[in-house]
Image (tube, rainbow, N blue to C red):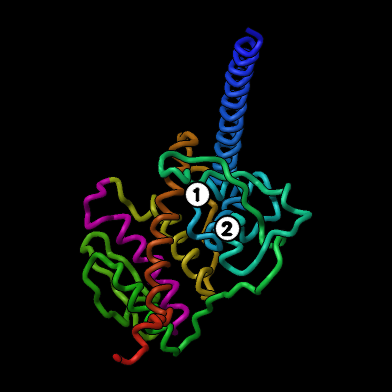
Amino acid sequence: MSIIANLGNIINEKNQSSELWQAQRQADRENTNAMQDAGVMQITSDPETYLRYLNCQADNPSYSAGNVALVMVQDQKATIFGTKERWKSLNRGVSPAEEKNGVKIYTRSSFGKGYVLTDVYDVRQTSGRDLKHTALQPDSKEMDEALKALLNYCVVPLVSDESIPMPAFYDSEQMKLAINPKYPDAEAFAGIATEIAHTRFHGKGYNQNYSREDYELDAQSVGYMICRRFGVPCEAPDVSNLSALYDGFDAMDRRGALGQIQDLAQKIGGSIERAITPQVRSRNMNRSAR
């Protein structure tokens, strides 16, 4: 009888422990969601914070806008961040003294469904091999390939026009992208990146809410992040109208708008990265047939 009684106690304790764990997990999620909303609201309300966000997002292109906002709220000094596994893949490791000082973001569950809270660490909390930074140089093969990859994202006809007083300009009425070929590579890259963002946001006219004024900050933001990712000089976006642009948006809508910008910059940047990175042939391909 005592064995059965003890087993009953064990079952009760297990159920209570599970309930407490679930309650704590839910509380952590609610706290994290509140931090994320606060971060997104701050980013889309304060020009200085918005520019810092663009730098952080550009330096961490694979992370969502919501996760970048989370990191910014929890670590004011964060620049480049990642999970322990990501740092390991880059031949760096989290310093033992910093292992308890990570900040929370959402990552996809290892079971393939839903998201879980995971610790990430800033580069200053790690040590190991130096990080590689891609910097496109003018008049180089890499710059040529990058410009080709960039232009491949244009969804409207291209025209050469030396009369326009800028590297590139998207005419939304004629739905054509004019490019002035006389501009230097760096200026051309920056200008084209911004104008191609306009073409994508207009979507061949399917986005009936498009206007150049309403999408100018978004397009400049995309161009700026792409330039920063590849070390191309670029002026920071004009954020003077930031608050007005996001007026009336709730936190979810603002996160969605930031996510649209991040998604486009990531896709274009990824295409450029693949274009300028030499393809490594497999060991078997290098072997002669036997």
For residue 138, above or below residue 73: below
Could you tell me which residue is drawn at 39 percent across and 76 percent down?
167
- In the foreground, 81 or 257: 81
* Helix, strand or loop status at disc 2: helix
- Could you tell me residue 77's position as x and y percent? 70, 55
Q: Is residue 165 visible?
A: no
- Could you tell me residue 144's position as x and y percent? 38, 84
Quarter where residue 231 is shown:
bottom right
- In the foreground, 48 or 68: 68
For residue 82, above or below residue 26: below
Q: Which residues are magenta?
A: 183-208
**Magenta portion: prevailing SS class:** helix
Q: Amino acid at mark 2?
A: Glu
The quadrant of the image that shows the N terminus is top right
Q: Amino acid at mark 1?
A: Ala
Cα distance in 3D space between marks 2 and 1: 21 Å
Q: Badge 2: few (under 14), some or many (20 or more) residues near its Cα, within 10 Å? A: few
Quarter where residue 96 is shown:
bottom right
**Residue assigned mark 2:** 85
Could you tell me which residue is drawn at 28 percent across and 67 percent down?
154
Q: Is residue 214 visible?
A: yes
**Residue assigned mark 1:** 65
* Helix, strand or loop status at disc 1: helix
Q: Badge 1: few (under 14), some or many (20 or more) residues near its Cα, within 10 Å? A: many
For residue 125, above or below residue 129: above
- Could you tell me residue 264's position as x and y percent? 39, 58
Mark earlier in primary sequence (2, 1):
1
